[in-house]
Amino acid sequence: MTEKMLNVLVLCTGNSARSIVGEAVFNHLGQGRIRAYSAGSQPTGKPNPAAIARLVEAGIDTSAFRSKSWDEFAGEGAPKMDMVITVCSSAAGEACPVWPGAPVRAHWGYPDPAHIPDPAAKAAAFDALYKDFSGRVAELLSHPLESMNAAERRDLLVQLAPVEG
């Protein structure tokens, strides 16, 4: 492929569950087209074990995942992002850093499965999150993202956003 790979940053406050799943799904389904990262405004310090378990179940290598601050992606030398997607309402409402490259931004809000106390219900919630996010990313990737302008990408991201509530 002669076109450049697009960079996506998936944000959530703690960067331990939803954003980790988002990063994994984008990298898994978008191989060769998308390079995804995740971060949070207040990282928890480690990925949620239930999120990691769901990714392992999907055959995704989780050895490199870590909970990290969004500051890593706002400084000099950070990769230029093409798209930034928030996956929790808290992160969507926070004042975000200025991202290199002026990426398009969208909110794909998901409920947080990390706080579900029952292990079976938590696993089911992570499964639902993974499946839903995978479907949205697959639909996104069915479009010619590399040849779309920023406004077209943003409109598509907004169109594909889950309905919260």
Image: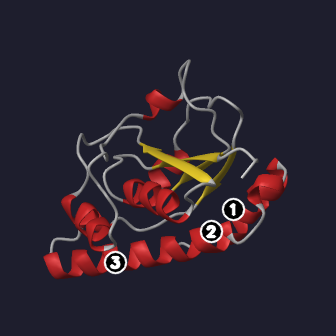
Residue 11's place in the image compared with 161, above or below, is above
Q: Are marks 1 and 2 in contact (CB under 8 Å)?
A: yes
Residue with the mark numbered 1: 157
Crowding near pointer 1: few (<14 within 10 Å), some, many (20+)?
many
Tell me the number on the disc at residue 161: 2
Tell me the number on the disc at residue 94: none
Q: CA distance from mark 1 to mark 2?
A: 6 Å
Q: For marks 3 and 2, give the one nearer the viewer.
A: 3
Q: Residue at x 42, y 54 (%)?
A: 19
Q: Amino acid at mark 1?
A: Leu
Residue with the mark numbered 3: 127
Across and down, in percent, residue 91 comes to 48, 47
As drawn, which residue projects farthest toward the top?
76
On screen, residue 50 versus residue 40, left or right, reads: left
Across and down, in percent, residue 96 comes to 55, 35
As drawn, which residue projects farthest toward the front?
1
On screen, residue 45 versus residue 139, left or right, reads: left
Crowding near pointer 3: few (<14 within 10 Å), some, many (20+)?
many
Give the quadrant of residue 102.
Answer: top right
